[in-house]
Amino acid sequence: MIRHTITNSIQEALKALDIVAEEVALEYPADVSHGDFSSNVAMVLAQKEKQNPRELAGKIQEEIEKNLPLEIERIEVAGPGFINFYLSQDFFTKQLEEILKKGDTWGRNELLKGQKIMVEYTQPNPFKPFHIGHLMSNTIGEAVSRIIEFSGADTKRANYQGDIGLHVAKALWAIGKESFDARSVNDLGAAYAYGHEKYETDEKAKLEIIELNKHVALGDSGLKDTYDIGLATSLNHFEEIYETLGTKFDYSFFESEGLTIGLPMVERGLKAGIFEESEGALVFHGEKYGLHTRVFKTQYGTTTYETRDLGLPILKQNEFNFDTSITVTAVEQETYFDVIFKVFSLLEPNFKGKLVHIPHGMMQLPEGKMSSRKGNVVTGESLIEEMKIGALKKMESFEVEHKDAVAEEVAVAAIKYSVLKQSSGKNISFNPEEALSFEGDSGPYIQYAHARILSILEKANTEGVTEKANALDVVTNVDTLLHRFPDVVARAVAEYEPHYITTYITELSSAFSTWYAHTKILDGTPEASVKLARAHAVAVTLKNGLWLLGIKAPERM
RNA sequence: GCGCCUAUGGUGAAAUGGAUAUCACAACGGUCUUCGGAACCGUUAUUCUGGGUUCGAAUCCUGGUAGGCGCACCA
């Protein structure tokens, strides 16, 4: 990578000057007129070397110029002591050829080669609705999975679902009392809501539900048929949503499985003094580790999510001997995972450093703008549906094959992009109208830019214009952005932050649109071939970038 | 109350301790007899507050203010 070439040059220069530097930072200047790369080493080292930063920068520049790599056109010292690097036309030409040659693999790296990583995300609960929080977890988890996969890791996607627990008991209890149909997703949601409400307000109902919960865990609730039907209904429903979202899980774990492993672990922990009895319950006092107390067995003798979650890493490892296991959930569970990981590390010290939690913000909808058809939760599918209707409306005047499928891809793009355009720990205020505006900073804008390029390529094909990457005419802003892609991916994977990709492809689309609006590509001149190659390289980069975000790139829209 | 996180134009966001804080939406004004107008160009407007560290702070430290989340039998 070019970054390493330049860093090496600087290090060689420093060595020649007899200066020791721990780290050489290289950044992209905010202003393109400041070159393609910029380094602040001179300013960082000035004080230690007791030299004026600009003078020191000048000396470094001189040294580098003695052995200037081919990729670099020139170097300059600017401002308070920055060393700016301008890449050569030769570099950009080779880059263009490389992108077209690599195609789908352009941007890949091997930072995680040889690593086995499992990513767990989405985690909806059967018998409960799939809500927008699950949509967020899925969007971020899928993007993270693809980014680490693109970085060479052996990647497995996992889902973890609550097939037992109080929520199941609430729904089953309600189905037993009222006429809810376990074959209907809507009814299941309503049944859960009803059971939940009674649990909170009706003491007698609460005790019945707790009693039922004990039996659900043992699989002898007496409602086995209803349970099986309800579970199947939920899981099938979730599968349809994953299909729409573009996720294919390698593993699906269930809480009932976690329980089998977690329960003996709790007993072992009790003997080891990790857990204590308190008010009839079995608890872990996290205070001595700066955490808080959590219950691993209730006073009613039922288990909690904590118990089952304790077994999960073991369950995962039995299937896939991972180096790292990533769990993506909402930020509200952050301190919860601190406790669970602490308890787990006490019981299983050899998992040290292998468990990672990525918390994401919550999705907030503008008040009154989204209908909440099922009580007070907005379901994932209703949000997708609403966006799809908007997309279809937008596409009314277009003649596109498979319009319905494309509209769905556009709808999903609009949602995912909104989630992935900001750093993942922050809450997101999702504005459906803005995401649907399809202008500027949106998923559909990028899909559009991509589709437009494909259409140009097709036209070139029918006109018999061929691509030529080896004779770059001029260096444009598009070219200077293109080479950054692998670097952007590397940064995204280092921080598990997909939004770097989002920001980058938006910048690239925008630069392309600007260039495109001022240049005719198929202009009948010999340069048309080069311009065509540049456009193609942008399409390749956008497509790979969108793929990393889990967003489809329709050929026509 | 305790702990964690956040605060950037009217709105939503970006910025690896670096140069004149970037982008989009909205508003206003323009462009072009479309290689697909879901386009392009321009104008207005921003780092919550007090102190500190640094050659240099939106970024680090510290006091405040405002908001989010968590803190015992839910997940």
Image (tube, coloured by chain):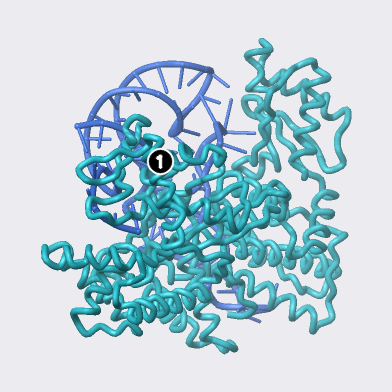
Chain colours: A cyan, B blue
Q: Position of residue A76 (x, y in %)?
A: 74, 32
Residue A388 in sight here: yes
User: How many C-alpha atoms fall within 10 Å of the one at disc 1: few (<14), some, or many (≥20)?
Assistant: some
Q: Quadrant of residue A161?
A: bottom left
Asked if A479 appears above or below A415 in the picture, the reply is above
Judging depth in this view, the residue of A364 and B54 nearest the camera is: A364
Asked if A522 appears above or below A544 in the picture, the reply is below
Is label 1 in a helix, a strand or a loop? helix
Q: What is the residue that sits farthest to the front in this orientation?
A: A271
Check the picture and name the quadrant holding the N terminus of chain A: top right
Q: Quadrant of residue A383?
A: bottom left
- Number of residue marks: 1
Query: Left of A28 or right of it: where is A272?
Result: left
Judging depth in this view, the residue of A269 and B34 nearest the camera is: A269
Asked if A471 appears above or below A15 in the picture, the reply is below
Residue A477 in sight here: no
The chain letter under disc 1 is A
Residue drawn at x 32%, y 82% is A182
Check the picture and name the quadrant holding the C terminus of chain A: bottom right
Judging depth in this view, the residue of A254 and A191 nearest the camera is: A254
Q: Position of residue A55 (x, y in %)?
A: 71, 18
Q: Position of residue A547 (x, y in %)?
A: 62, 65
Asked if A163 appears above or below A18 in the picture, the reply is below
Q: Amino acid at mark 1?
A: Gly
Residue drawn at x 28%, y 63% is A214
Q: Name the residue tied to disc 1.
A: A269
Residue drawn at x 68%, y 61% is A541
Q: Position of residue A225 (x, y in %)?
A: 35, 81
